[in-house]
Image (cartoon, grey):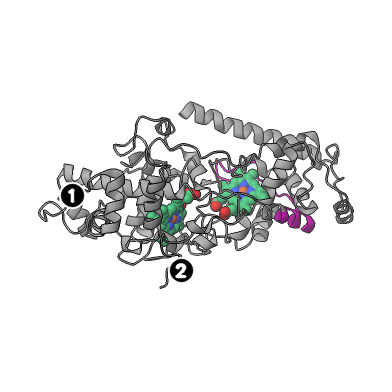
Amino acid sequence: MPAARRAALAVIAGVAAAVLAASLAAGAGTPAPGAAPAGSVSDAAGASAARVVFTEQERARILQYAPLGPLPADPTNALADDPRAAALGQRLFFEARLSPGSFSCASCHVPPHAFTDGKPVSEAIAKGRRRTPSLLNVAYRRWLFWDGRKDSLWSQALSPIENPVEMGGNRLAVVRLLASDAELRGAYEDLFGALPELDDAARFPPAARPAPFGASGATAMDAIGASSATGATVAIPAAGAIDPLAAAWLAMKDEDRLAVDRAFARVGKALEAYERRLVGRGSPFDRFLAELRAGGDGASLPEPAKRGLRLFVGRANCRVCHSGPELSDGEFHDVGIPPGPGAAVDSGRYGGIDELLADSFNARGPHADAPPSPAADKLRGLRRQPEHWGQFKTPSLRNVAVRPPYMHQGQFASLRDVLKFYSTREGALPPGPAQERLLVPLHLTDEETDDLIAFLESLTDAPLDDALLFRPGDPQTPAHHAP
Ligand code: HEC
Ligand code: HEC
């Protein structure tokens, strides 16, 4: 939808300009009605003693942060909300046999750590190139990965399994595992019917997968960078490398590849059904919103967090991108974060779009249930543009305080560091053609920084149901990968 997308961007730009103009006016010394007067640090300290009473405009902006609604449907996965599929998915999420290196999804998305790993960039078979995002509320996200190269959870789940630096597995070995393990086989066949017959060794080698185009691993990422820069449409394999798994895949018959792909896609569909249950609730912010919506003044939120919220929806402009129940617009922006130490240039959304369009597991591909669905509409007209270069998905800010480090390569260790960046813009990359113009130094005082942190801390949910945090039937085994 290029027109719709352009319109959406124009709306964002328009909102940004309006917010910016308003904040410049406010900065010129005219406090909004009811706002604490802006001024010296001692003024600010004086203001901190006063109770925050939100203006009508602030209330309206705050009330746009509705609590998470019902899960958005995924018409591309007929079993997305089937409890048996979720049970199989949970089993698979903790299944280290999907990887020859004995890594599972839970090795990086560690359940007790808000489903992330606390590292600047992920590390399994080898070091990856980006930070592991939290999976809490992941079913509410329109695009997946930092560069949006996946459009459904089931399709996303397939790529870490085969990514050479993540789990390093392959789809044929995955289907063989399902076939050979009585429990997995039973659960799969109850849901999806018979697995393909893999006994004919002439048709089905022990292991096979296509050449990894654009998995988030270092090799493939380098290939995306190279192909994006040269305008070529295929990944460039490492010079002289022979990929025996890809050769085995190419040697298979079309219909056999399709049968393996179908079973592999269903592995993703079960994983999605589990991931859809990872929904956080009960944050202090949600409690406050409920009070406000009921006409109260939101007394349960401590004053510093309220002052932080006032900045967030006001002078600091955070709300422009961190909007909606997830505190993310679900879209992509370049906020000018320089790459982490030693990291190569990352094309972000620019590379992600091409990969998504080429993906046979996307919403309009043969493995999507019920195509063409509205989920496929969002692919229509999607085309990479120069302004996509260096854009990354706006992360959700829910639970942000409990899952450092931050940004796509974990460039910042703490929320204080993040806010220092937004406040000073020190070290920001020089603005490219599309870098957000509204990102100007905010010159936050120490107290304002503390207040914003207090607000961000109010976004931490109540703990998830314990039953979701462990391998089913194995509640004693924490979901860590023990190297
Ligand atoms: C080696 C660590 C690692 C493993 C193992 C791993 N992931 Fe991830 N996961 C990541 C990283 C890193 C990203 C972000 C990569 C990027 O954006 O390019 C990510 C992204 C995701 C996302 C997208 C979240 C978002 O907000 O966009 C989902 C969903 C996800 N992983 C689920 C899974 C599932 C399911 C498995 C197992 C099949 C798995 N991951 C295995 C590290 C890992
Ligand atoms: C122009 C859109 C935009 C605005 C305005 C904006 N952000 Fe962000 N924010 C993003 C994007 C995009 C990222 C991820 C950037 C990256 O990794 O390259 C991000 C990342 C973050 C993160 C790190 C989250 C994580 O999981 O890594 C925090 C915290 C954050 N922003 C808070 C704020 C606050 C507070 C404000 C207001 C002072 C703000 N943002 C303003 C778009 C924006």
Question: Quadrant of the rendered structure where residue 403 is?
Answer: bottom right
Q: For the residue marked with disc 1, what is the amino acid?
A: Leu
Whichever of callouts 1 and 2 sits on the residue coming sooner in the sequence is 1
Give the residue at x 38% y 46%: 154
Question: Quadrant of the rendered structure where residue 164 is?
Answer: bottom left
**Vertical side of 130 occupied by 262: above or below:** above
Residue 471 in the image: state x and y as whole percent. 42, 61
Give the residue at x 57% y 39%: 69
Verify whether residue 153 appears in magenta: no
Ligand 1 under 8 Å from disc 1 Cβ: no
Residue 455 in the image: state x and y as whole percent. 71, 52
Q: For the residue marked with disc 2, what is the amino acid?
A: Gln
Q: Secondary structure at mark 2?
A: loop
Secondary structure mainly formed by the magenta segment: loop
Q: Secondary structure at mark 1?
A: helix
Q: Is residue 222 visible?
A: no
Q: Nearer the viewer, residue 471 or 176?
A: 471
Q: Which mark is residue 476?
A: 2
**Residue that label 1 marks:** 250
Q: Quadrant of the C terminus?
A: bottom left
